[in-house]
Amino acid sequence: MTLLDPTPATLADRLAGPPVGRSWADMDEFETFLDDGGIVEAHDDMPEAYRTEVFRFIELHANSELMGGLTERDWIPRAPGLRLKQIFLAKTQDEIGHAHLLYMVAADMGMKDREQMLADLFAGRTRFHNVFHYQAVTWADQIAIAYLVDAAAFASQRAVFQNCSYGPYKRVLKRIIAEEGFHMRHGEEMLLRIAEGTRIQHEMFQAALERWWMPAVQLFGPDSSPDDPLLAWHIKSERNEVLRHAYVQKYVPLLQGYGFDIPDSGLRHDPVDGWLISEIDWSELRATMRNGGPDSRRRIATAAGSYADTAWVRDALAAAS
Amino acid sequence: MRTFEVFLKKAGKDEFRHVGAIDAADAELGVTLAREAYVRRGEGDDLWLVDRTHIVVGPPAFVRGNHDKPHRHNDGAAIAERRRQQRETA
């Protein structure tokens, strides 16, 4: 006896099978739905172009959380003092946790499973944020990352969360953003401490700032193209250059207030537009995003090695069930 | 490997809420991993994991069929109008 068409399926079958949710006649109808604040769910019959673009974006985000978590991990043994070691342990767990949540959301889009996404990352076939392609030289670099880089990532993620049209992504972003908020406060506390420290500590952070200012500003990417599909489909809620400009307005005076120099000889203040930075040469970002950054090769090898080294844990868990 | 959907509830508050999913070899590991992935800062007191293969999904078109049933609501407008008229004639 069949009462319902289609017959109720399990969630697992529904996500694995063909889409059974809402469908749209064409791209115009779909875009109107998105413009009206519509939220797309995993089982909806979304246009393939949307599925591909959103999947790639979430995969990039997931990869970046994983690579960021591994960077934090490197510094746990070197963090000065027990409290900072605890903070770095917690942050590492947060970042790896974010990667996990995002890989689950990405996998449910039906394009690649987690194993494939990790294999592609370790083989250098996919991308992760530019800021994780550079080397952290001293503890001050780690502070610059915790403060400047996390703040840039936070600003760009918050802009995605604001108006995000893909429901499963928006829901995990809520948690991720809340936790990144704690990280930023940790970052500013660390900065405050080093800024008020000895002359050598001050110089250490200034040197780190010179290494990390540009990558942090570049994280927002070049000016958005007018036909960026991620803007049209309400994944990004704000243009790259607007986010970058807002970031500069906030962090230039903040860093100067702590007594540091912004490493940009062309930096100037305009009475109307506020702080303006020098023209950015985007070839560095393009090369970095193709895994050609100064530390890309070592970072990817470290990540792949760490995954290979822990294979026995996954094998043991799988065998125990 | 099993995939579990994760639900959380705070003690004495609201209903269970879906928070995401977790892959785990079995239920015991699922609970362990879900705690670490979803409940690191007191987000809930009660944790439910439901195997994805055990969740039955209602066909959306069937569910939506009940959305447009005005006779199941009453906005009270007719009564308010009647009372207003009574007040005016009194």
Image (spheres, coloured by chain):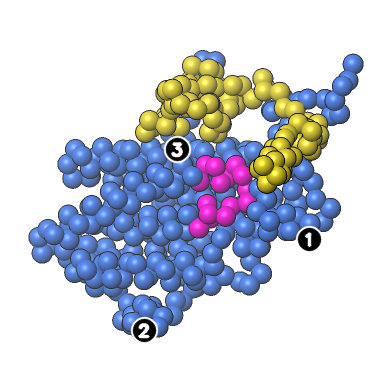
Chain colours: A blue, B yellow
Q: Which quadrant, please, contains the C terminus of chain A?
A: top right
Nearer-the-camera pick, B29 or B81: B81
Q: Secondary structure at mark 3?
A: helix
Q: Secondary structure at mark 1?
A: helix
Main secondary structure found in the magenta portion: helix
Which comes sooner in the sequence, label 3 or label 2?
3
Which residue is tagged 2? A270
Which residue occupies 44% across, 48% down?
A177
Q: Are marks 1 and 3 on the same chain?
A: yes
Q: Are marks 3 and 2 on the same chain?
A: yes
Which residue is tagged 1? A28
Query: x, y (%) of residue A73?
Result: 34, 42
Q: CA distance from mark 3 to mark 2?
A: 42 Å
Tell which subunit mark 1 falls on. A
Which residue occupies 31% across, 56% down?
A147
Which residue is tagged 3? A97
Name the disc covering residue A90, or none: none
Q: Amino acid at mark 3?
A: Gly
Which residue occupies 71% across, 23% down?
B56
Q: Amino acid at mark 2?
A: Asp
Magenta span of residues: A159-173
Tell which subunit mark 3 falls on. A
Q: Amino acid at mark 1?
A: Asp
- Residue B60 visible in the picture: no
